[in-house]
Image (spheres, grey):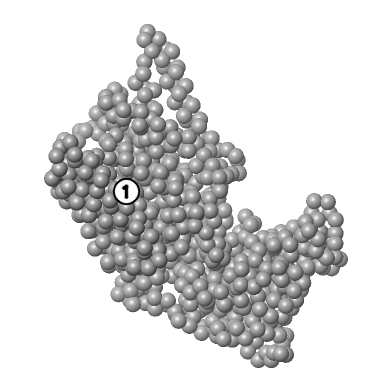
Amino acid sequence: MILNITLLSLGKFNLKLHHLLIVGILSLSFVVSFLVRSQAADYGFELNEFDPFFNYRATQYLVDNGVNAYFQWHDNLSWYPTGRDVAGSSQVILHMTTAITYWIFGGGMNLYDFTILFPVILGSLTSIVIFALVRVIGGTTAGLFSAVFSSVSLPLILRGTIGWFKSEPLGLFFGLLATYFLLSGINSKNKKIAIAKLIAGGIFLSLSISAWGGCQFFIIPIGAFFLTLPFVRSDHKFIIWAIPIFTVTAILTGLNFERVASNFVFGMGGISLITSTIFVISCIFIQSKSNENKKTRNGLLFLTFILIIGTCFLIINADTHFLPLPSYRYLNAINPFLTTSNPLVDSVAEHASTTVQQSFMFHSILMIFAGLGIWLIIKNHQIKNSRFIKNDMILFSLIFGLIGIYISSAFVRLEVFASLSLIILSSLGLSVLVKEILKNKIEGKKFKNLIIKFSFLAGIIILLIIPISYPTNGNWVTASKAPPTILNGGSAYPVSTNDWLESMEWIKNNTPKDAVFASWWDYGYWISTLGERATIADNATISTLVIENLAKMLMSSPEEGWQMLKDMQADYVVVFVSGQRLSVDNGDQALYLLQGGGDESKKQWFMRIGGVPLEKYLQSDGISGTDYFWNNALLGKMFPFTPIAYVNLQNNQQSATYQPGFTPIYVKDIKYPSDGNGPLRLVHTSPSFNVEKGQPMIGVFIYEVNKNFIPTK
């Protein structure tokens, strides 16, 4: 075959044409992934979202002060006045890995720029790791398919675009690397190499959980896979010591990280991994003492016993909490049918349940290929001479695939695991399909045989191209292109402004260094990192009580809200309003439409979290504020706008009062001017407050708390 032609011999290694093909496809996958993930740079070279700014600040502290100082660091700019134990409450391994790679590869690059590029490089390298993992499971062809799929997978790209210096890219990279080392280790014929790989797998599993708590997902398919090994592997003498090496290494590594130790090692995840490992040892022992014809039966009876005991333990632990339960979001991932009455959890967009429409958009043709993959794997396994995947690898791919799809139904954020599952199953299925197409021949009809094969392959290529090119503005490639959040405030407008950057610079240069800022928790990391000032709450959500108090403050009367701000020791308050100036003005008054994704669009969540009656503050549409909101709530007073009329945008009907189906139109109205005697004073407005007609407004408004205010009641 032409692909086996030797191009160069180096000792015992022969460089063949198919080696160049592999390198070429992997290089292409890396480049495509890098380019797709980097599209947001067209709007501006900035960190994206909220958490990356804290991760950058923590990494900067580590780089400037060293490892020992980092582990002793109590951050006084977070969660004022109590502060935050950084090493015990954040993704330590993300900060350490970034700092180490920066010291090695950073050169003269600014750390901020390095952290912007870090997730893109890491996400692109993940396609190489996926190739290695799937190659262990089903061969080189399947591995190459998986590398290509991962380079354009929308869920993976969305959680690792340029500037996305968050936990997922590194966590997934380490988690997949751990899985690769585990599978490669138990398939290795060399015991020394197997031990090294199993130890590496255990280390990287704990590192992945330290980088991102969501990587506890890997424990579920790995634990379930362990339960099958005594039945599908005949080399029991190897398995009985190989699996404990992996588990013990993972546990010992996790003990070195406070957050991992409390959430994994001494939690349900660690116990699950340990239990499945003990089962492997016990089951192999039972089978060794059983008659040949009763080995499988006795093993299955023991497995049934373990599953019953485990289920009873989980039920008892749910009430007694003998072992600490994971947080709600992890429980919800295990049981997607759980519901919560906690509006703080519900308010986070990435905690929303995945819809059918989103699933089809995320996975598209991979769903079909994955189903085909399951069928072809099972079909070919039944034909003895057609087997190309070992029994244990078949079970792992099916376990990983089905669990990944199940888990992802809980949160949109977890769609990355459905994507990984479908990539593995699709790649295996397509590799089988391609093998079948290429090996089948039609007797005496060579030309027709080539035409049929070419048509099959062309059809597969066309199906794969469709989701990355159609529809034009919503395919796998273009859907990931959006402005960094700091440039549009996370609003609905795909624009790039300097409103937030300018406001944070104003805070840093125009407020006392010991000033304390109150805001909705979304903006806490921006204020502490860019503004360099202490904040009362941020995205770490360390104290739900503090966030609830902030919500109550915003919904309280101006006098009560002012008193709550004083009790919080706040000196300034920041609010964010996003909207658009209409092309038509009302005489000398500019008209605005405020539904752009700022606090004006989040206020219903403030109300739910603060526990106030929504009907008192919101109209029947659940969005528009009532007169009570605008006249009696501190948040309504802080919005420098007032509704002047209501319009039905479908037929241009107008009304002086709210009517169902009508949208409020606003005019500027600063209730607390900088020279006023009210509870607050507006001391800064961002540039787009004076936006031109027809343009989006990304309005950041900074109020100073008037300590000399005298309440009237």
In this image, 47 relative to 95: left or right? right
Q: Circle 1: is it few (<14), some (14-19), or many (20+) Cα within 10 Å?
A: some
Image quarter for residue 607? bottom right
Residue at mark 1: 224
The relative height of residue 19 versus residue 193 in the rendered view (above or below) is: above
In this image, 124 relative to 544: left or right? left
Please report the residue visible at 49 percent of the width from the left and 46 percent of the height from the top: 154
Kind of residue sitting beneath label 1 = Ala
In this image, 39 relative to 12: left or right? right
Across and down, in percent, residue 103 comes to 33, 64
| Residue 59 is at least partly visible in this image | no
| Residue 347 is at least partly visible in this image | yes
Across and down, in percent, residue 369 comes to 45, 34
Please report the residue visible at 60 percent of the width from the left and 40 percent of the height from the top: 472
The relative height of residue 349 versus residue 28 in the rendered view (above or below) is: below
Please report the residue visible at 46 percent of the width from the left and 60 percent of the height from the top: 329
Q: Residue furthest top?
A: 444
The relative height of residue 591 versus residue 479 in the rendered view (above or below) is: below
Across and down, in percent, residue 343 comes to 56, 66
